[in-house]
Amino acid sequence: MSTIATQDLTYQFPHAASTAIRDISWQAEAGSLTLVVGDSGAGKSTLLRCLNGLIPHFHGGHIAGHVSVLGHDTRDVAPRDLAHAVGLVFQDPEAQIIADRVEDEIVFGMENLGMDRRTMRVRLEETLDLLGIHHLRDRETATLSGGERQRVAIAAAIATRPDLLVLDEPTSQLDPLAAHDVLAAIRRLNDDLGMTVVLAEHRLDRVLAFAERIALLRDGRMIEGPTQEMLNHLDDVPPLVELARSFGWQPIPLTVREARRHIDRLAPHPSPQDHSRTLGDELVRLEDVSHRYDGQEALRRVSLSGRAGEVIALIGRNGSGKTTLLKHINGLLRPSGGRVIVHGKDTSGRPVYELARSAGYVPQNPSAILHQETLADELRFTLRAQERNSAIDSLLATLGIQQQRERHPLDLSGGERQRAALAAIAIAQPPILLLDEPTRGLPGRDKATLAQFVRQYADAGRLVIVATHDVEFVANAADRVIVLADGEIIANGPPRQTLAGSLTFGTQMNRLFGGEVLTVADVVRQ
């Protein structure tokens, strides 16, 4: 029996110049787990919103063909009538959470479905334990980190025990351990309850191993099939698959365990090459900085410095203090203890608009800073505010979004919006660029473009500080890695020194080969 059946599905958003998806005929069997992949803007989120009736009932537009979910034609059934059977987690958890308290958010859906109190209580406890967020139950949702919000949104969807669980980038803001926990919970629901799962994800290294089938969207059209067969159709692949392709391994290993059967054939043993860089003046210094949220310490006597020409990566578990640290550098937050020095001056008493000229900040949620009618207007607005001139088209082309220059920023896909927000800040060329989860929603090709941009930006005599959970991006882009835990710096050094041997933050290549090997380039010499 098919949980999902589409026939010649085509959809075009209101006022859009072209269709978002077209001629999609696809079936997902009951109890299956399908991974939806594709470039930014390929139509993944659009397809997922067709599965619970948000398209066409909420978004409007023009739809052709048919979508049947659990035997219901979504054109005839409103989203509220599918809510008991279809759980959908959006790409932006900020847009989904409505309650003030974590526990209230998780039970909200169950209350609206009229579940009895005993069932709600049992499912609440089970869900908190399943996702490892029991410690968050009494927290205010407004105080959660981006990754913590993402887990709460997933918990709220899972708690109703839908027949179909639809997830849009469910691990985009999660640290590696949290992502492992969430995906293990999803797999358990799929295995133990037979829940049908459809998930869109760019972090393929996390999900390929347990996806039964892959649905690839390219230019709005779909190719679908078993995972191993579909690997040959993918351009963006995780490091293990890239390595296997280089050496012709068959079948292609999807886990480090599977890849270990092949590595004894490699000779010589991989030897990493380091690149030293000449750094300029100190642009940022934090001296014993502390900060508290509602009585909870988010930063504890943090001291660090950053110099021109450097790319610094901040990593650590969700809630470890990465975003809090970034916001102190541009004045959005002020220290409760210690001081922050930017360009040799204490930030105390300096207004945010003044600090923004020196430290441009791109937040986790890019929509928060996009407010003009077109992408080009966003960049013009920044240039007017900063009284600087720059080449708009050149920057958009560098980031791969020049084709979107006349579109409304909020009509862009998640990955395109991420790069749009970066462009809106970077166009003014601030000496310090602060990026919070910049790879969120980006496929591998776009992450490589971003890594190159970040390196070039720093090489021009500026400082880039990136808060991220993407260790593969860190290995390719960063000069220095700072590890935060419970608001404290626990490690500070080059990527090969900091990431190597880490169970949590090691790259796929490091887990496979050990030593100081971090990337495929360390193994495959061009």
Image (cartoon, rainbow, N blue to C red):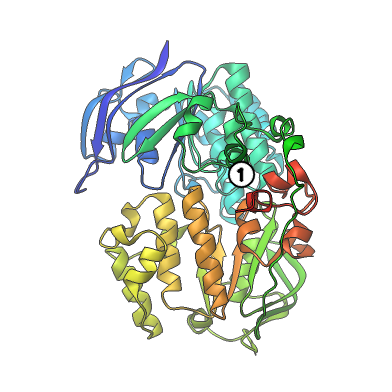
- Is residue 355 rendered to the left or right of residue 45? right
Q: Nearer the viewer, residue 332 or 66?
A: 66
For image coordinates 45% across by 72% down, the residue present is 426
Q: Nearer the viewer, residue 25 or 270?
A: 270
Quarter of the rendering occupied by the C terminus: bottom right
Classify 10 Å Cα crowding around label 1: few (below 14), some (14-19), many (20 and above): many
Name the residue carrying label 1. 239
Residue 228 percent location from the top left of the image: 53, 26
Report the number of discs: 1
For image coordinates 47% across by 15% down, the residue present is 30
Indicate the quadrant where residue 337 lies.
bottom right
Going by the numbered disc 1, the residue's amino acid type is Pro
- Does 292 sit above or below residue 174? below
- Does 345 sit above or below residue 208? below
- Does 248 sit above or below residue 331? above
Asked which secondary structure carries label 1, the reply is helix
- Does 470 sit above or below residue 190? below
Residue 11 percent location from the top left of the image: 25, 36
- Is residue 81 rendered to the left or right of residue 91? left
Quarter of the rendering occupied by the N terminus: top left
Q: Nearer the viewer, residue 252 or 53?
A: 252
For image coordinates 48% across by 59% down, the residue present is 449
- Is residue 291 rendered to the left or right of residue 331? right
Residue 308 percent location from the top left of the image: 62, 80
Indicate the quadrant where residue 434 lies.
bottom right
Q: Nearer the viewer, residue 427 or 494?
A: 494
Q: Is residue 67 visible?
A: no
Residue 317 percent location from the top left of the image: 70, 52
Indicate the quadrant where residue 303 lies.
bottom right
- Is residue 437 rendered to the left or right of residue 502? left
Which residue appears farthest toward the bottom when viewing the image?
A: 345
Q: Is residue 156 visible?
A: yes
